[in-house]
Amino acid sequence: MEALLTRSPAWLAVVLGLVLVEVVWRLRSGRGYDRRNALTTLGLAAGNIPAALLNGILIGGVFAFAWKIAPFHFPLDDWRTWAAGFVSVEFAYYWFHRASHRVRWLWATHAVHHSPEQMTLLSSLRLGWTNLLSAGWIFYVPLVLAGFAPKLVVLLLALDLRYQFFLHTEAKLRLGPLEWLLNTPSHHRAHHGRNEAYLDCNYGGVVIAFDRMFGTFRPERTDEPVEFGLKEREPEGNPVRLAFREWRLLLREMGQAYGVRHAIRIAFSPPGSIVAPRVSTIEAMS
């Protein structure tokens, strides 16, 4: 769904122009530009087109059904609906994004986005193909049931994701006092860090307020340079293998589990946690 929301000819033209500007800036500043990383991202983006279309059809159907049974509909022609909708979508996005880092079933899709070891605008387009399966879209269904039109939810999500495009850069851009409220490139660089100092923080979309409210905000530190990429994972340049790597590892562990309950525990455990199959007392003593 994320990939589908961020595609339009005009927007893609803006993305292409800014990506080219960033390439020139990185090369001239001596930062370099990882072409292999860029090609992997473009491969993932291409594969996301059919996946996004399928997601849009099926998830759109769920949203339409939720809208049909919703007991109340907020009017779209009232500015208060859009104001309340913005806050509600940001709140839902925060918890969706937080769960995507703390639940392995969701992380299996989201890990693709965190795989590049260089923070560039282009890396914002590196998205997984399995959003339908990981079911993070469920976080937005309650908004429709609460009376927010699917059109409003989808549009605000699209604006949220487009805003985040500008956050994926190593350029030292500052917003002054607005950084207390808005998400910034600095905040998002910390979010992408694989250092222990930065793991599991800064989940906000447009605003960083919910991270401050729920204790998940961490600033980028001058004494701790951010290391990008996945912790304890080798770089993977093949888009297909990368799109399904975490699923393969997760399902293998679930297949080795001691029963269904243990398999479910593995699926809903945080990434990186070790949930070894239980053994009987006789096996442990042998």
Image (cartoon, rainbow, N blue to C red):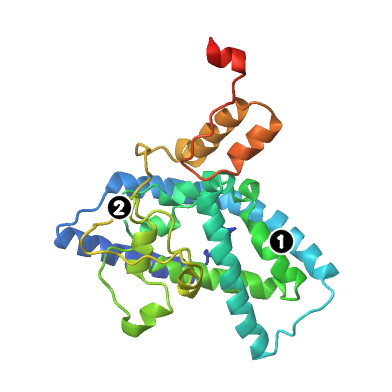
For residue 15, say whether it is visible.
yes
Q: Secondary structure at mark 1?
A: helix
Q: Amino acid at mark 2?
A: Gln
The residue sitting at 70% across, 31% down in the picture is 260
- Report which residue position mark 2 lands on: 118
Q: Amino acid at mark 1?
A: Gly
Can you tell which quarter of the image residue 59 is in? bottom right
The residue sitting at 45% across, 39% down in the picture is 242
Question: Which residue is nearer to you in this view: 123 or 275?
Answer: 275
The residue sitting at 79% across, 65% down in the picture is 66
Can you tell which quarter of the image residue 143 is in? bottom right
Q: Secondary structure at mark 2?
A: loop
For residue 121, say whether it is visible.
no
Question: Which residue is nearer to you in this view: 80 or 208?
Answer: 208
Q: Residue furthest top?
A: 286
Question: Which residue is nearer to you in this view: 270 or 121?
Answer: 270
Q: Badge 2: how crowded within 10 Å, few (<14), some, or many (20+)?
A: many
- Asked whether the residues under the numbered discs 2 and 1 touch, taking CB atoms below 8 Å apart as contact, a structural biologist would say no
The quarter of the rendered structure image containing the N terminus is bottom right
Residue 67 is situated, as x and y percent measured from the top left of the image, at: 79, 69
Instruction: State which tag comes first along the sequence, 2 or 1.
Output: 1
Give the numbered dot on residue 60. Answer: 1
Q: Is residue 30 above or below residue 130?
A: below
Q: Badge 1: how crowded within 10 Å, few (<14), some, or many (20+)?
A: some
Give the numbered dot on residue 77. Answer: none
